[in-house]
Image (cartoon, rainbow, N blue to C red):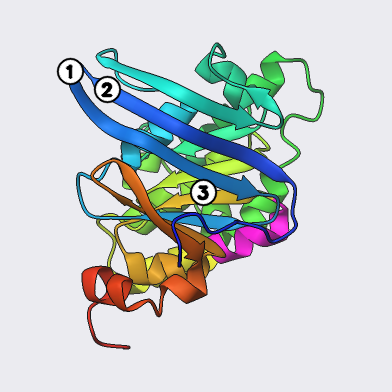
Amino acid sequence: MSANAANNNGGEILLDVSNLHAHYGKVEALHGARLQVRAGQIVTVIGPNGAGKSTLLNAIMGALPTSGTASGKVNYLGQELASMEVEDRVARGLCLVPEKRELFATMSVEDNLQLGAYKRKKNGEANYMDQLESVYDLFPRLLERRRQAAGTLSGGERQMLAVGRALMSKPRVLMLDEPSLGLAPLITKEIFHIISDLRKTGVATLLIEQNARAALQVADYAYVLEMGESVMEGPAAELATNKQIVESYLGFSKH
Protein backbone atom coordinates (compact mmCIF):
# COMPACT_ATOMS: atom_id res chain seq x y z
CA MET A 1 0.00 0.00 0.00
CA SER A 2 1.35 3.41 -0.92
CA ALA A 3 2.51 5.70 1.85
CA ASN A 4 0.08 8.24 0.45
CA ALA A 5 -2.95 5.97 0.54
CA ALA A 6 -6.11 7.77 1.58
CA ASN A 7 -7.75 6.90 4.87
CA ASN A 8 -11.24 7.32 3.47
CA ASN A 9 -13.85 5.14 5.10
CA GLY A 10 -16.29 8.06 4.89
CA GLY A 11 -16.41 8.92 8.60
CA GLU A 12 -15.82 12.41 9.95
CA ILE A 13 -12.13 13.16 10.56
CA LEU A 14 -11.78 13.67 14.31
CA LEU A 15 -8.00 13.79 14.57
CA ASP A 16 -5.68 14.92 11.79
CA VAL A 17 -1.93 14.94 12.43
CA SER A 18 0.45 16.19 9.75
CA ASN A 19 4.18 16.92 9.54
CA LEU A 20 4.65 16.25 13.25
CA HIS A 21 8.19 16.62 14.58
CA ALA A 22 9.27 15.97 18.15
CA HIS A 23 12.65 16.57 19.78
CA TYR A 24 14.23 15.53 23.07
CA GLY A 25 16.99 18.09 23.39
CA LYS A 26 18.89 17.87 20.09
CA VAL A 27 17.56 14.39 19.25
CA GLU A 28 14.64 14.32 16.81
CA ALA A 29 12.29 11.44 17.66
CA LEU A 30 9.59 12.15 15.05
CA HIS A 31 10.28 13.32 11.51
CA GLY A 32 7.11 14.59 9.88
CA ALA A 33 4.78 11.87 11.19
CA ARG A 34 1.16 11.89 10.03
CA LEU A 35 -2.12 10.10 10.69
CA GLN A 36 -5.86 10.52 10.66
CA VAL A 37 -8.52 9.05 12.92
CA ARG A 38 -12.11 9.07 11.73
CA ALA A 39 -15.33 8.61 13.68
CA GLY A 40 -16.07 4.97 14.43
CA GLN A 41 -12.57 3.79 13.53
CA ILE A 42 -9.88 1.84 15.31
CA VAL A 43 -6.57 3.08 13.90
CA THR A 44 -3.28 1.44 14.85
CA VAL A 45 0.33 2.53 14.58
CA ILE A 46 2.82 -0.32 14.48
CA GLY A 47 6.60 -0.31 14.30
CA PRO A 48 9.74 -1.52 16.06
CA ASN A 49 10.88 -0.48 19.52
CA GLY A 50 12.31 3.02 19.43
CA ALA A 51 10.33 4.02 16.35
CA GLY A 52 8.69 6.93 18.20
CA LYS A 53 5.24 5.43 18.71
CA SER A 54 4.78 6.55 22.34
CA THR A 55 6.34 9.92 21.50
CA LEU A 56 3.68 10.31 18.81
CA LEU A 57 0.86 9.87 21.35
CA ASN A 58 2.49 12.17 23.90
CA ALA A 59 3.02 14.85 21.26
CA ILE A 60 -0.64 14.63 20.20
CA MET A 61 -1.67 14.87 23.85
CA GLY A 62 0.69 17.78 24.55
CA ALA A 63 2.36 15.68 27.24
CA LEU A 64 5.98 15.39 26.15
CA PRO A 65 8.52 15.42 29.02
CA THR A 66 9.97 18.80 29.95
CA SER A 67 12.98 18.16 27.69
CA GLY A 68 10.69 17.55 24.71
CA THR A 69 9.34 19.92 22.08
CA ALA A 70 6.93 19.30 19.22
CA SER A 71 6.03 21.12 16.00
CA GLY A 72 3.66 20.40 13.17
CA LYS A 73 -0.12 20.31 13.00
CA VAL A 74 -2.40 18.44 15.39
CA ASN A 75 -5.97 19.22 14.42
CA TYR A 76 -8.73 17.80 16.63
CA LEU A 77 -12.44 18.36 15.92
CA GLY A 78 -11.45 21.07 13.47
CA GLN A 79 -9.27 22.99 15.93
CA GLU A 80 -5.49 23.30 15.99
CA LEU A 81 -4.21 22.15 19.41
CA ALA A 82 -0.77 23.81 19.45
CA SER A 83 -1.53 26.21 22.31
CA MET A 84 -4.00 24.01 24.21
CA GLU A 85 -3.08 22.59 27.64
CA VAL A 86 -3.35 18.85 28.30
CA GLU A 87 -6.34 19.18 30.61
CA ASP A 88 -8.20 21.22 28.01
CA ARG A 89 -7.54 18.52 25.41
CA VAL A 90 -9.00 15.98 27.83
CA ALA A 91 -12.01 18.22 28.43
CA ARG A 92 -12.63 18.32 24.66
CA GLY A 93 -12.66 14.52 24.49
CA LEU A 94 -9.07 13.55 23.63
CA CYS A 95 -7.77 11.00 26.11
CA LEU A 96 -4.57 8.95 26.52
CA VAL A 97 -4.15 5.70 28.46
CA PRO A 98 -0.37 5.62 29.01
CA GLU A 99 1.78 2.51 28.88
CA LYS A 100 2.34 2.58 32.66
CA ARG A 101 -1.43 2.92 33.32
CA GLU A 102 -0.77 5.29 36.28
CA LEU A 103 -3.54 4.07 38.56
CA PHE A 104 -3.91 5.08 42.20
CA ALA A 105 -2.97 1.75 43.79
CA THR A 106 -4.34 2.39 47.30
CA MET A 107 -7.68 3.71 46.07
CA SER A 108 -10.62 1.50 45.18
CA VAL A 109 -11.54 0.58 41.63
CA GLU A 110 -14.62 2.80 41.78
CA ASP A 111 -12.69 5.75 43.20
CA ASN A 112 -10.20 5.44 40.33
CA LEU A 113 -13.10 5.46 37.90
CA GLN A 114 -14.60 8.50 39.59
CA LEU A 115 -11.29 10.33 39.16
CA GLY A 116 -11.63 9.75 35.42
CA ALA A 117 -14.74 11.93 35.51
CA TYR A 118 -13.12 14.62 37.68
CA LYS A 119 -12.74 17.17 34.87
CA ARG A 120 -16.41 16.76 33.95
CA LYS A 121 -17.38 17.29 37.59
CA LYS A 122 -15.12 20.34 37.81
CA ASN A 123 -16.83 21.75 34.71
CA GLY A 124 -20.17 21.51 36.50
CA GLU A 125 -21.71 18.56 34.65
CA ALA A 126 -24.51 17.26 36.84
CA ASN A 127 -24.36 13.80 35.23
CA TYR A 128 -20.57 13.47 35.32
CA MET A 129 -20.81 9.82 36.46
CA ASP A 130 -23.15 8.81 33.63
CA GLN A 131 -20.54 6.54 32.00
CA LEU A 132 -20.11 4.30 35.06
CA GLU A 133 -22.80 1.80 34.09
CA SER A 134 -21.47 1.42 30.54
CA VAL A 135 -17.92 0.94 31.89
CA TYR A 136 -19.17 -1.82 34.18
CA ASP A 137 -21.06 -3.36 31.23
CA LEU A 138 -17.84 -3.36 29.22
CA PHE A 139 -15.75 -4.62 32.14
CA PRO A 140 -17.92 -6.83 34.42
CA ARG A 141 -14.86 -7.73 36.50
CA LEU A 142 -14.47 -4.10 37.54
CA LEU A 143 -18.00 -4.17 38.89
CA GLU A 144 -17.16 -7.30 40.89
CA ARG A 145 -14.01 -5.63 42.27
CA ARG A 146 -15.34 -2.08 42.60
CA ARG A 147 -14.50 -1.90 46.35
CA GLN A 148 -11.09 -3.53 45.91
CA ALA A 149 -7.85 -1.50 45.95
CA ALA A 150 -6.53 -1.00 42.43
CA GLY A 151 -3.09 -2.21 43.48
CA THR A 152 -4.46 -5.69 44.25
CA LEU A 153 -5.78 -6.26 40.71
CA SER A 154 -4.14 -8.54 38.15
CA GLY A 155 -2.28 -7.01 35.21
CA GLY A 156 -5.22 -7.53 32.88
CA GLU A 157 -7.66 -6.04 35.38
CA ARG A 158 -5.41 -3.00 35.86
CA GLN A 159 -5.45 -2.45 32.10
CA MET A 160 -9.24 -2.72 32.11
CA LEU A 161 -9.38 -0.15 34.90
CA ALA A 162 -7.06 2.22 33.05
CA VAL A 163 -9.27 2.06 29.95
CA GLY A 164 -12.44 2.32 32.03
CA ARG A 165 -11.13 5.38 33.85
CA ALA A 166 -10.38 7.04 30.50
CA LEU A 167 -13.89 6.26 29.25
CA MET A 168 -15.34 8.07 32.28
CA SER A 169 -14.15 11.34 30.71
CA LYS A 170 -16.48 10.61 27.74
CA PRO A 171 -13.77 10.82 25.06
CA ARG A 172 -14.35 11.18 21.34
CA VAL A 173 -10.86 9.78 20.62
CA LEU A 174 -9.22 7.30 23.00
CA MET A 175 -5.47 6.75 22.59
CA LEU A 176 -4.04 3.50 23.97
CA ASP A 177 -0.28 3.07 24.45
CA GLU A 178 0.79 -0.61 24.42
CA PRO A 179 -2.32 -2.02 26.15
CA SER A 180 -1.01 -5.61 25.94
CA LEU A 181 2.38 -4.83 27.50
CA GLY A 182 3.32 -7.43 30.12
CA LEU A 183 0.09 -9.40 29.77
CA ALA A 184 -0.23 -13.16 29.25
CA PRO A 185 -1.46 -14.26 25.79
CA LEU A 186 -4.97 -15.19 26.97
CA ILE A 187 -5.37 -11.85 28.75
CA THR A 188 -4.01 -10.04 25.70
CA LYS A 189 -6.69 -11.71 23.57
CA GLU A 190 -9.35 -10.56 26.03
CA ILE A 191 -8.04 -6.98 26.03
CA PHE A 192 -8.12 -6.83 22.24
CA HIS A 193 -11.65 -8.21 22.21
CA ILE A 194 -12.61 -5.34 24.53
CA ILE A 195 -10.84 -2.82 22.29
CA SER A 196 -12.92 -4.11 19.39
CA ASP A 197 -16.04 -3.69 21.52
CA LEU A 198 -15.19 0.00 22.01
CA ARG A 199 -16.69 0.59 18.55
CA LYS A 200 -20.11 -0.02 20.12
CA THR A 201 -19.55 2.95 22.46
CA GLY A 202 -18.98 5.30 19.52
CA VAL A 203 -15.45 6.10 20.68
CA ALA A 204 -12.75 6.25 18.00
CA THR A 205 -9.52 4.53 19.08
CA LEU A 206 -5.89 5.23 18.24
CA LEU A 207 -3.89 2.17 19.22
CA ILE A 208 -0.11 1.99 19.64
CA GLU A 209 0.91 -1.63 19.93
CA GLN A 210 4.05 -3.78 19.75
CA ASN A 211 1.91 -6.87 19.05
CA ALA A 212 1.43 -6.03 15.37
CA ARG A 213 -0.55 -9.16 14.55
CA ALA A 214 -3.20 -8.48 17.20
CA ALA A 215 -3.30 -4.78 16.37
CA LEU A 216 -3.89 -5.38 12.65
CA GLN A 217 -6.61 -7.92 13.43
CA VAL A 218 -8.61 -5.45 15.50
CA ALA A 219 -7.93 -2.21 13.57
CA ASP A 220 -9.66 -0.71 10.54
CA TYR A 221 -6.68 1.29 9.33
CA ALA A 222 -2.97 1.15 10.09
CA TYR A 223 0.20 3.19 9.88
CA VAL A 224 3.77 1.92 10.07
CA LEU A 225 6.26 4.11 11.93
CA GLU A 226 9.99 3.48 11.51
CA MET A 227 12.73 5.66 12.98
CA GLY A 228 10.23 8.46 13.60
CA GLU A 229 8.82 8.49 10.07
CA SER A 230 5.47 7.34 8.67
CA VAL A 231 6.64 4.88 6.00
CA MET A 232 3.46 3.02 5.07
CA GLU A 233 -0.29 3.12 5.62
CA GLY A 234 -3.44 1.41 4.47
CA PRO A 235 -6.46 -0.65 5.53
CA ALA A 236 -5.32 -2.94 8.34
CA ALA A 237 -6.50 -6.09 6.55
CA GLU A 238 -4.33 -5.19 3.55
CA LEU A 239 -1.24 -4.45 5.63
CA ALA A 240 -1.73 -7.75 7.45
CA THR A 241 -1.11 -9.57 4.15
CA ASN A 242 1.57 -7.21 2.82
CA LYS A 243 4.75 -9.23 2.27
CA GLN A 244 7.02 -6.55 3.73
CA ILE A 245 4.87 -6.20 6.85
CA VAL A 246 4.54 -9.96 7.29
CA GLU A 247 8.31 -10.47 7.09
CA SER A 248 9.18 -7.49 9.30
CA TYR A 249 6.51 -7.65 11.99
CA LEU A 250 4.33 -10.73 11.78
CA GLY A 251 6.71 -13.58 11.00
CA PHE A 252 5.88 -16.19 8.39
CA SER A 253 3.37 -18.20 10.42
CA LYS A 254 -0.32 -17.57 9.94
CA HIS A 255 -1.07 -19.00 13.37
For the point 39% across and 70% down, the residue is 214
Point out residue 71 in the picture as x, y percentages from the top left corner: 42, 20
The tag on residue 203 is none
Tell me the crowding category of disc 2: few under 14, some 14 to 19, or many 20 or more residues within 10 angstroms, Cα based. Answer: some
Q: Nearer the viewer, residue 236 or 136?
A: 236
- Alpha carbons under labels 2 and 3: distance apart: 22 Å
**Residue 138 in sight here:** yes
**Residue 103 in sight here:** no
Question: Which is more N-terminal, label 3 or label 2?
Answer: 2
Residue under label 1 = 26
In magenta, the rendered stretch is 195-202
For the point 31% across and 78% down, the residue is 243
- Alpha carbons under labels 2 and 1: distance apart: 6 Å
Q: Is 160 one of the magenta-colored residues?
A: no
Q: Quadrant of residue 239?
A: bottom left
Quadrant of the drawing holding the N terminus: bottom left
The answer to whether marks 2 and 1 mark residues whose Cβ atoms lie closer than 8 Å is: yes
- For mark 3, give the secondary structure: strand
Question: What amino acid is at disc 3?
Answer: Leu
Q: Quadrant of residue 144?
A: bottom right
Residue under label 2 = 23
- For mark 2, give the secondary structure: strand
The tag on residue 206 is 3
